[in-house]
Image: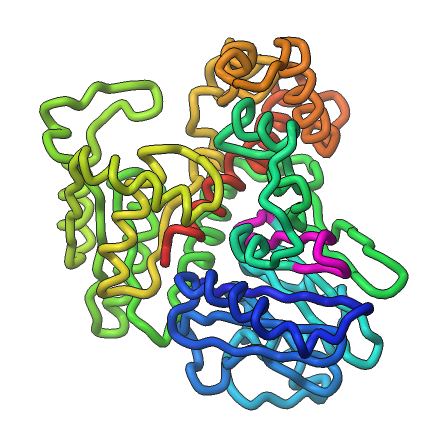
Amino acid sequence: MCGIAGWVDFGRDMRREQKIMSEMSAVLAPRGPDASGEYSDSTAYLVHRRLIVVDPENGRQPMSAGDLTLVYNGELYNTEELRTELISRGMSFNGHSDTEVVLKCFMEYGEDCASKFNGIFAFAVWDSRKRRLFLCRDRIGVKPLFYSFAAGGIAFASEIKSLLKNPHIRPVINAEGVMDIMLMGPAKRVGGGVFRDISEIPPACCAWFDEDGFTLSRYWELKAAPHTENFEETSAHVRELITDSVKRQLISDVPLCCFLSGGLDSSVISAIAAEEFRKRGEQLHTWSIDYKDNHRNFKASSFQPDEDAPWIVRMAEHIGSLHTDVVLDTPALTAALDDAVLARDLPGMADVDSSLYLFCKEIKKQFPVALSGECADEIFGGYPWYHRMDVLFYDGFPWSVAVPERAALMRMNISSAEAEAHVRTAYDECLSHTAYLDGESPEDRRMREMYHLNLDYFMATLLENSDTKVI
């Protein structure tokens, strides 16, 4: 994880804004504790904070080539394929970082480069000759990218609090932002930044900013297609895709470990990773989290029918990993709530956030990079709202079913009808992007809608939250 920020203004000499940009950069230091860099000219100022994972020497940022300068936060999983393709087109490379591949791809393909990337990313490219800024975010929105016009021109950053270090961007929350937090939490509106003058580049979108204005466009969206494989073919295909995905994410020049909760998702990832480590003559480290007296107090639910601990032990023994348990107590979780909210910039999932914050804090003492099995339930239908008909057909976000009750907790004077209308607008906008097939049953149509609700809201929130915490 890295941190990026920048400010482009055609009406001021940006070389004089070092103090503000240094403060915006400093806030991002936990995202990139290993190195920092900056670029400035009369119109643009870009800063970068780096967590070194690949190519320490040749992956420094901001990275320039000709008139183009890049700041990038992310990881490409098809770096080598793209590098080979670019070399065949006459490009040369100084190192083996994915940062250089992103920059050279942009040089070769312009904004179409985004559709070639297999990975998670948020990046900005400044063209000093054409005086144009390009902003881009990955398909699912794992890597955050916020922006504001309040400073004059455009300012952007990986985190809201970095933008708020710009004195021209005030920390004012309007009614819409409050309703996002209180009525839709832990999610927020796609593209919203909660604060009045802050927005985000939505997932799968890119934008241009120049003297003619700001243009936002979508470069990818899900499409519906008939499923023609039988069960055996589907099983083999899913296995191939998951195995390939995990292997691609094991490339690192620094120590790497895996989260292991005992659930299906983290167990599959850890098993694949452990086998790859064995091939190298290495042993995988796995980590799990538990809570003091959890065995005594655990109560099964539809979201978690079993305790994690017994399955963690069985999996760690089965794959032969070196395993570490991090045991937390309630006072520590309570004490970490403020730090967890500060790391995320917004109120979120309370004890879940503080748990992840403390867990990752322990892991970071030994491992800069960790693979997680986040969001398998969203993709493979593990939540009750996928298979319980009463919840599946609920006409709203399934994790936000008590909108009037939430509205009643607000100090702002808002009626139940206003609250329902706010959530309904976001809900309808999300469903408007769902692609259907002709002749589908009502259940199949609703399953597609439910997937979109999870992809755009719940899944995006969890993935962005994990990116924030693994520092």
- Magenta-colored span: 140-155
Magenta-span inclusion, residue 224: no
Lateral position of residue 444 relative to residue 205, left or right: left
Q: Position of residue 110 (x, y in %)?
A: 77, 70
Taking depth in this image into account, of 311 and 188 the one nearest to the observer is 188
Quadrant (top left, top right, bottom left, bottom right) of the N terminus: bottom left
Q: From where the camera sits, is residue 129 visible?
A: yes
| Residue 293 vertical position relative to residue 159 in the rendered view, above or below | above
Lateral position of residue 154 relative to residue 388, left or right: right
Taking depth in this image into account, of 90 and 359 the one nearest to the observer is 359
Q: Could you tell me which residue is drawn at 58 percent across and 47 percent down?
A: 140
Magenta-span inclusion, residue 151: yes
Lateral position of residue 22 relative to residue 136, left or right: left
Taking depth in this image into account, of 242 and 321 the one nearest to the observer is 321
Determine the image quadrant of residue 193: top right
Q: Where is residue 103 in the image (x, y as percent from the top left)?
A: 65, 76
Q: From where the camera sits, is residue 158 visible?
A: no
| Residue 319 vertical position relative to residue 131 in the rendered view, above or below | above
Q: Where is residue 337 in the image (x, y as percent from the top left)?
A: 32, 39
Q: Could you tell me which residue is drawn at 35 percent across and 24 percent down?
A: 303
Determine the image quadrant of residue 301: top left
Quadrant (top left, top right, bottom left, bottom right) of the C terminus: bottom left
